[in-house]
Image: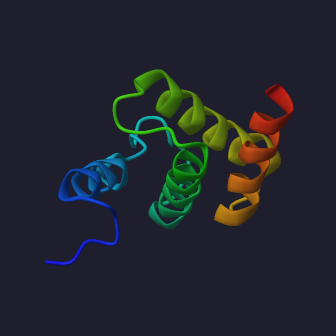
């Protein structure tokens, strides 16, 4: 099998990132479609910030921020949410 990454280990690690989900209890008040949108924003932000499966604190912080942004702004667009999280991370660095 051909992997788009350098090794099978990196491929498996990438799959673990995508297997991580935003817990339904964290996304209370959102319909299933909105939860999928939040998950997409979360996954893309984790990938862009290189926050991987072993970084529980980083993953939880990103998930919490995505959910908080959606709740407080009413925005349910994965790209907008992801870009806002990335902007805030850049400003904090």
Compare residues 49 and 27 and report the one nearer the observer.
49
In the displayed image of the protein, which residue is found farthest to the bottom?
A: 2
Q: Would residue 11 be visible to someone looking at this image?
A: yes
Q: Position of residue 64 (x, y in %)?
A: 59, 32
- Is 51 drawn above or below residue 18 in the view shown? above
How has the structure been colored for display? rainbow
Most extreme residue toward the right, as rendered? 91
State the image quarter where residue 81 is shown.
bottom right
Q: Position of residue 10 (x, y in %)?
A: 29, 52
Left or right position of 18 against 59: left
Q: Quadrant of the C terminus?
A: top right
Residue 3 at x, y = what percent?
26, 71
The answer to whether residue 62 is left or right of residue 25 is right
Residue placed most toward the observer, 16 or 39: 16
Q: Residue at coordinates 34% horizontally, 64% vertically from top-left?
A: 5
Which residue occupies 52% across, 60% down? 40
**Outermost left residue:** 1
Image location of residue 2, percent across then percent down? 21, 78
User: Residue drawn at (36%, 48%), measured in percent from left and top?
Assistant: 17
Against 18, is 50 above or below? Answer: above
Residue in the image at 56% along x and 54% along y: 38
* Image quadrant containing the N terminus: bottom left
Question: Could one spot residue 77 in this view of the protein?
Answer: no
Image quadrant where residue 6 sits: bottom left
């Amino acid at each position: 099998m051909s992997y788009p990454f350098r090794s099978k280990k990196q491929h498996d690690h990438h799959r673990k990132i995508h297997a991580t989900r935003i817990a339904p209890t964290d996304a209370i008040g959102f319909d299933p479609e909105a939860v999928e949108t939040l998950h997409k924003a979360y996954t893309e932000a984790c990938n862009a910030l290189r926050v991987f499966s072993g970084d529980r604190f980083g993953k939880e912080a990103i998930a919490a921020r995505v959910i908080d942004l959606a709740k407080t702004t009413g925005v349910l667009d994965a790209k907008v949410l992801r870009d806002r999280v990335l902007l805030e991370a850049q400003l904090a660095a």
